[in-house]
Amino acid sequence: MKHIVCFSGGHSSSLVAIEVVRKFGNKDVVLLNHDINESVEHQDIKRFKKQVTDYLKLPITYANMKNVESMDQFDVCEKHGGFLKGGGSRASMSAACTTILKTEPFHKWLEANVPDKNCIIYYGFDKNEPQRIQRRAQILGAQGYKSDYPLAFWNRTIESTLEVGIEPPLTYTVWKHANCQGCLKGGKQHWYVTYINRPDIFEKAKATEESLGYSIIKGITMTELEPLFEKMKQLGIEASENIQSGKFWSEAKKVIKQSDEDQKPCECFV
């Protein structure tokens, strides 16, 4: 029985890796990672992944898209001809980058390395993500694979890598996850954070939208969002994904409204 941990390099998947190794030992555990281009991966993720794998005494096993060293998510979509891939409606489609960078290499690796499907695949979803757990379990189950979710269902032995002397990635001071910066599934808040922290990626997103003729966010382009983001920047609105979305935009609107009112001309009569 192989125990395959979907190891993104983020904090949650690292906790799963630790839980699985503590329960089963490391002999039959695989830390499966889909590497992404270093231009869009936070530099501290690589440090974190190395420290976790050193602690577990396990190597990272890579299931990578071809040419990942030279292609980021925008290049993938340029080659594909759009941001979405899949069914006939937007709702049934998936991000092309996810499919090509991760899903397809993942299934190719499984077919080549676990042809008898004698494995359990582990994910870092927690008890607050029941829909993601249900969807993933159904998809893998239909393909004949078992899956498990230690952060949701197991009696936890660890809550933070700090407990084993490993500092979580610095990316979490601003970003919610360890995935690509400039995530093509991210919303306006994510892209505001990108605009502030990675203007180079924001510019590439604009250029890719123009080249493909499609927008990353439905109904609005990065070029159209840029004046709003610049105004938010000038008003000092914090760029963080760690603020709940509703609260983030509520506070942002208040600040913008106050700024607009302050700039209205005086209507007094002399």
Image: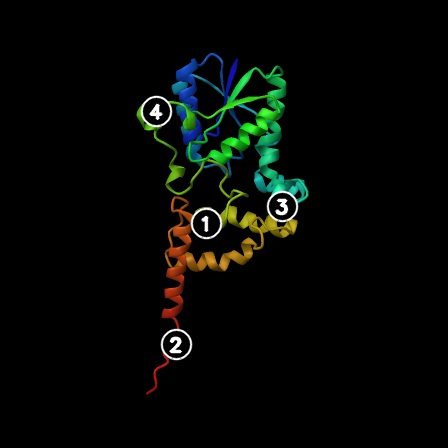
SS at mark 4 in the image: loop
Front position among marks 2 and 4:
4
Disc 3 + disc 2, Cβ < 8 Å: no
Query: For residue 265, which numbered disc appears in the image?
Result: 2
Q: CA distance from mark 3 to mark 2?
A: 45 Å
Query: For residue 48, which numbered disc appears in the image?
Result: none
**Which is more toward the observer, 172 or 254?**
254
Looking at the rendered structure, the kind of residue marked 1 is: Gln
SS at mark 3 in the image: helix
Q: Position of residue 62 (x, y in %)?
A: 54, 24
Query: For residue 158, which numbered disc appears in the image?
Result: 4
Mark 1 lies on residue: 189
User: Which label's residue is closer to the chain start, 1 or 3?
Assistant: 3
- Residue count near mark 1 (Cα–Cα under 10 Å), binned few <14, some 14–19, many ≥20: some
Q: Position of residue 152 (x, y in %)?
A: 42, 28
Mark 3 lies on residue: 90
Front position among marks 3 and 2:
3
Q: Position of residue 16 (x, y in %)?
A: 43, 25
SS at mark 2 in the image: loop
User: Which label's residue is closer to the chain start, 2 or 4?
Assistant: 4
User: Which label's residue is closer to the chain start, 3 or 2?
Assistant: 3
Disc 1 + disc 2, Cβ < 8 Å: no
Looking at the rendered structure, the kind of residue marked 3 is: Arg
Looking at the rendered structure, the kind of residue marked 4 is: Ile
